[in-house]
Amino acid sequence: MLSRVAESLFWMSRYVERAENTARFLDVNFNLLLDLNRITTVESPECWIALILVTSDRERFESAYGDYGAEPVTDYLVFNRQNPNSIISCIGMARENARSVIESISSEMWEQINNLYHYLQSATPQSVQNDPFSFYREIKNASHLFQGITDSTFPRSEGWDFMQVAKYLERADNTARLVDVKYHMLETTRQEHEEVVSRSVDIIEWMAVLKSCSALEAFRKRYLARIEPRSIMEFLILDRSFPRSINFSVCAAKEALWRLSGGSGGRSLNSADRLIGKMEAELSFTTMDDISDTGLHHYLERLERGIREVGEEAHLTYFASHTPEIEPFPDKDRNLPATRRKAEWREAQQQQQQAYCP
């Protein structure tokens, strides 16, 4: 498979996953505000700032809008074309990548991503404000339909594995950032409510965290009625059976990467394999006590950094153009300077964003 085709499939899958995650976060936040308004006064900026912290660059948002609220945050995360993480930008870039490899994907995949793109072109901020539930449901359903069509029509070849790596790296990163931000915001603000409503607020907000990962029903089946922060953290980070947990996503990404390289029997063939293998092994034997001893923020920050490094190494291994002077030997590929790896990864992301010219 040409590296150009593999890279386009990788980014197409990653951008669709990112758009679906953003739509789900926004949808859950709107419903959370409705639930909280019934029992306590809601400070709008505090409820919206978490979405920016999880999905985008806070400085970029504040330079463009300044104030946090439903309208500016929705506009920035849905319609702002200057924000590479907005839904309209992600779907636009996913469509551009699909168009560039249209001969390599099924016609049904192209039709679905194209239909979603044109649906977003016809949407307006006013229509989203009037009926956010229907809008976000359409985005989520369209993304799920795209993944289902891909599962049903795309051959289980190298291209499939690149798409799986992208989807699960993006999913693990989103879950890690959501858990990190929401946990510390909830623990910091819980004292602001009166004691009478504190427990109710806690339950509603922690249920929203689970809903943001589409995990509420699965969590309840595992832990029955116990809505407790420690149990939620354990489920979203360490559970090996739930498809949106960090552990499950890292395992799925590792399996796809090892299929691509031919790594088997504990033998990895490149830096991306080794990094993802180390992450998977650590998650398999980590307990919540270990995370508490390390500190949740520090542990998740290290996980996020590891996920980024896997993406960087996968890019260098499969997509980047190397010259003989800098081509590393198989057993010394980690000697490539970290600054160069990060620079090439950032350049690849920028090229993806520049390729989409609405």
Image (cartoon, rainbow, N blue to C red):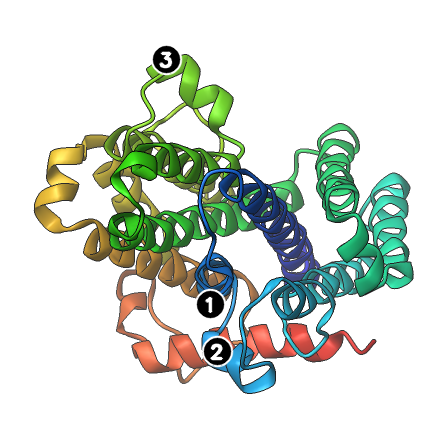
Q: Secondary structure at mark 3?
A: loop
Instruction: State the residue position of label 2.
Output: 344
Instruction: State the residue position of label 3.
Output: 224
Q: Secondary structure at mark 2?
A: helix
Across and down, in percent, residue 124 comes to: 85, 63
Residue 15: quadrant of the picture: bottom right
Packing grade of label 2 (10 A; few <14, some 14-19, many >=20) is some
Instruction: State the residue position of label 1.
Output: 316
Cα separation between marks 2 and 1:
8 Å
Cα separation between marks 3 and 2:
47 Å
Across and down, in percent, residue 304 comes to: 34, 57
Left or right placement of residue 59 versus residue 107 in this view: left
Left or right placement of residue 112 versus residue 198 in this view: right
- Residue pictured at 11% horizontal, 49% vertical: 294
Q: Amino acid at mark 3?
A: Leu
Decide: is 256 above or below 51: above
Confirm or deny contact between disc 2 and disc 1 (CB under 8 A). yes
Report the mark closest to the observer, 3 or 2. Answer: 3
Residue 251: quadrant of the picture: top left
Q: Amino acid at mark 2?
A: Glu
Packing grade of label 3 (10 A; few <14, some 14-19, many >=20) is few
Decide: is 213 above or below 298: above
Q: Secondary structure at mark 1?
A: helix
Which of these two is toward me, 164 or 93? 93
Across and down, in percent, residue 149 comes to: 78, 34
Across and down, in percent, residue 242 comes to: 45, 26
Q: Amino acid at mark 1?
A: Leu
Q: Earlier in the sequence, mark 3 or mark 1?
A: 3
Residue 217 in view, yes or no:
yes
- Residue pictured at 51% horizontal, 51% vertical: 170
